[in-house]
Amino acid sequence: MARGAAKAAELASGLGAIILGAGLALLLPDALRGYAIPILVAGILVHGVGMSLKHRRETVEREPLWWERALFWFCRVCLGLLAIWLLVRLFKT
């Protein structure tokens, strides 16, 4: 599969997962409320692992551009802040 087609498939898959999750959250807000923290933790972990694997694969192919590296670390910081917020919220209750 050509690199562009692989990227398009990856983007479509990720976007579909986001839309599916949003649809479930809108349809089942009361039923999912009790699982909000575990779902967020799972999302942080899965996204973090996927992002790291993608970053490693791309750095083997070529040196990342400055903005790609900055975006990667910005996302890492955001995930870390979200994890801290979740821990504070979890232990606050």
Image (spheres, rainbow, N blue to C red):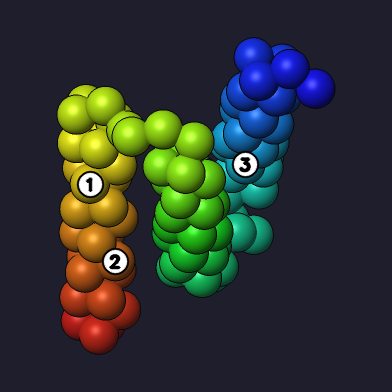
Q: Which disc, if any, is residue 83?
A: 2
Q: Is residue 5 left or right of residue 90?
A: right
Where 9 sits versus 55, above or below?
above
The residue positioned 49% from the left and 36% from the top of the image is 61
| Quarter of the image with the C terminus in it | bottom left
How many C-alpha atoms fall within 10 Å of the one at disc 1: few (<14), some, or many (≥20)?
few
x%, y% of residue 40? 46, 60
Where on the picture, by quarter, is residue 13?
Answer: top right
Look at mark 1 in the image and give the residue it sits on: 73
x%, y% of residue 67? 21, 26
Element carrying mark 3: helix
Q: Is residue 11 left or right of residue 76?
A: right
Look at mark 3 in the image and give the residue it sits on: 21
Element carrying mark 1: helix
Near-viewer residue (36 or 16)? 16
Element carrying mark 2: helix
The residue positioned 24% from the left and 61% from the top of the image is 80
x%, y% of residue 48? 43, 57
Report the Cα–Cα distance between label 2 and label 3. Answer: 19 Å
